[in-house]
Image (cartoon, rainbow, N blue to C red):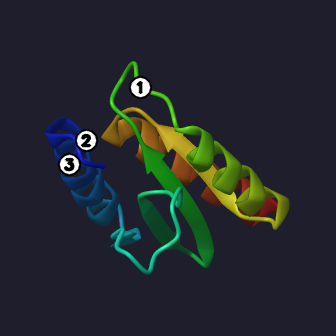
Amino acid sequence: MAQKGESQLVRWTTDLLQKNHWWVYKIHGNQWSRNGIPDLVVIKGGVHVWIELKMPGNKPTKIQEYEMSQMREHGAKVIVAYSAMEALEGAERSLMYLAKV
């Protein structure tokens, strides 16, 4: 997430999720990390959700799409969100759905 706008989106999203009692961890890319992993992993009530944040109009890269599909195949809940509210709503939907399963 090199773009300044996306960095702000990460901060807003982190703040909103934490205010709604989600544990939030920002994935920091470096030379040892795997490319294409979503920006955030959030946890609430035992439910883990991976969130890729994008500015409106942007799309996940091919490597991001590949990694997210691999994660989903292994049972991970992964969402792409274009706003902090969309990230919160997606995480909460995952929590409600998985609580019923």
Q: At numbered mark 1, what does the secondary structure look like: helix, strand or loop?
A: loop
Horizontal arrangement in the rendering, residue 49 relative to residue 33 (left or right)? right
Circles 1, 2 touching at the beta carbon (< 8 Å):
yes
Q: Residue at x 63, y 53 (%)?
A: 78
Label 1 sits on residue = 58
x and y percentages locating residue 45 in the rendered image: 57, 75
Label 3 sits on residue = 7
Image quadrant in which you'd find residue 55: top left
Q: At numbered mark 2, what does the secondary structure look like: helix, strand or loop?
A: helix
Instruction: Point out the image quarter for the C terminus.
Output: bottom right
Label 2 sits on residue = 6
Q: Residue at x 53, y 41 (%)?
A: 80
x and y percentages locating residue 14 in the rendered image: 28, 59
Give 11 or 36, whichever is nearer the viewer: 36
Image height of 26 relative to 80, above or below? below
Circles 2, 3 touching at the beta carbon (< 8 Å):
yes
Q: Which mark is residue 26?
A: none
Q: Residue at x 16, y 45 (%)?
A: 8
Image quadrant in which you'd find residue 58: top left
